[in-house]
């Protein structure tokens, strides 16, 4: 889908491999301290048991002394057989295409989600494109320490955009992304795609088996964890119940303009009373200010200014304003909007029109 002339994204080319066959333990990482021969044999046997399956890689290429986990250390990776799962491959392909479409103007191209996203460069540009906000981070970072610092800033912003509290347990972290943990990267990308209503269809019910290996009391043990990456969704455009606005967008753009003009007339009838005017429904309601003031005018009360941000500075303040306006709607007897506050802030026009149309239906006769 991408032009061959477009440059590859940072780290799009895998580093040159050694001639030896890469084993499971190579992928987990170069491990630990040298052990006595007897202990090495025990560790090797435990390792073989941990990965014993028809899809296992070949025997370790490194000498046995080099692959002992530290005491209480834990490592994990996707089980080799799961990497061949058709639905997992489809999910990765869909996400890669989506990222490349979003970043086409930056002449970036992602080939491998784990190799190309670990340093934060692509994630930074993706978030900036999705949110319209410029992140205060260096464009290029070379050292591991600087990469992690940049990634820390980028992920903190992503968590705020996704509405994740600092105390919540996210399925990704600076360490897991920087160490190219595929499951963590997929969780993050799926969350972003859903948050911003990406025009893609995510394969549903994608589950991968993750091998988690732990060393305790000098012995390796393992467990297989089934990790759900996607589930069955009912809130994406391809899955949700279609309504009149879907039909207008798809088949009657001329009638859509008539509806938008009627809604502009409706909201300005109220907002003009306080010397405000809407000319563009696509953008002027996304920060929640006009939506909040409109509810006050329709219900006949003054909304205290300390209850919302009159000049919101960032994404969080805009979400607060829209959520507050939604509360006022419910207090007036309207059902809870199907849209999320984040949808309005993210300039999802269908969501904005649905909210305004619900107001129009109830208040169209209010002077």
Image (tube, grey):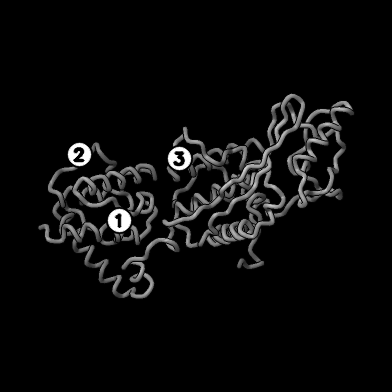
Question: Left or right: 34 with respect to 215?
Answer: right
Please tell me which residue is depicted at 63% across the width and 68% down the height of the picture.
Answer: 3
Task: Provide the residue designation for mark 2.
Answer: 304
In this view, which residue lies farthest toward the top?
217
Q: Is residue 145 above or below residue 347?
A: above
Q: Is residue 149 above or below residue 18?
A: above
In the rendering, which numbered label is found on residue 164? Answer: 3
In the rendering, which numbered label is found on residue 114? Answer: none
Task: Provide the residue designation for mark 1.
Answer: 284
User: Earlier along the polypeptide chain: callout 2 or callout 1?
Assistant: 1
**Do the numbered discs 2 and 1 sit on residues whose CB atoms are within 8 Å?**
no
Residue sitting nearer the eye, 271 or 89: 89
Rendered location of residue 324, percent (x, y): 28, 44
Q: Residues within 10 Å of mark 1 (few under 14, many from 20)?
A: some
Judged from the image, the secondary structure of the residue bearing numbered disc 3 is loop
Rounded to the nearest angstrom, the CA distance separating label 3 from label 1 is 26 Å
Rounded to the nearest angstrom, the CA distance separating label 2 from label 1 is 21 Å
Judged from the image, the secondary structure of the residue bearing numbered disc 2 is loop
């Amino acid at each position: 889908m991408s032009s061959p002339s477009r440059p590859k994204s940072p780290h799009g080319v895998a580093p040159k491999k050694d001639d030896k066959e890469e084993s499971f333990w190579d992928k987990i990482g170069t491990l630990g301290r040298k052990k006595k021969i007897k202990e090495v044999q025990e560790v090797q046997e435990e390792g073989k048991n941990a990965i014993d399956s028809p899809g296992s890689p070949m025997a370790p290429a490194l000498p046995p002394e080099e692959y002992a986990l530290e005491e209480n250390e834990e490592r994990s990776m996707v089980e080799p057989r799961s990497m061949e799962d058709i639905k997992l491959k489809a999910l990765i392909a869909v996400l890669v295409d989506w990222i490349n479409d979003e970043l086409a103007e930056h002449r970036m191209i992602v080939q491998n989600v784990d190799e190309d996203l670990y340093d934060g460069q692509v994630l930074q540009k993706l978030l900036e494109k999705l949110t319209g906000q410029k992140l205060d981070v260096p464009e290029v970072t070379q050292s591991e320490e600087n990469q992690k610092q940049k990634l820390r800033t980028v992920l903190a912003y992503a968590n705020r955009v996704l509405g994740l509290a600092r105390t919540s347990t996210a399925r990704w972290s600076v360490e897991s992304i920087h160490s190219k943990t595929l499951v963590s990267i997929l969780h993050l990308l799926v969350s972003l795609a859903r948050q911003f209503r990406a025009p893609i269809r995510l394969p549903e019910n994608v589950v991968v088996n993750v091998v988690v290996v732990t060393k305790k009391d000098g012995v390796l043990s393992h467990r297989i964890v089934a990790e759900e990456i996607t589930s069955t969704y009912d809130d994406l455009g391809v899955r949700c119940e279609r309504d009149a606005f879907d039909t207008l967008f798809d088949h009657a753009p001329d009638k859509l303009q008539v509806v938008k003009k009627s809604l502009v007339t409706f909201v300005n009838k109220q907002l003009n009373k306080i010397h405000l005017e809407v000319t563009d429904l696509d953008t002027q309601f996304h920060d929640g200010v006009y939506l909040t003031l409109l509810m006050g005018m329709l219900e006949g009360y003054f909304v205290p200014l300390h209850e919302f941000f009159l000049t919101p500075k960032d994404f969080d303040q805009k979400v607060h304003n829209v959520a507050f306006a939604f509360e006022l709607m419910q207090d007036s007897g309207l059902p809870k909007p199907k849209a999320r506050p984040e949808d309005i802030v993210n300039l999802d026009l269908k969501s904005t029109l649905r909210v305004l149309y619900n107001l129009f239906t109830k208040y169209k006769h209010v002077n």
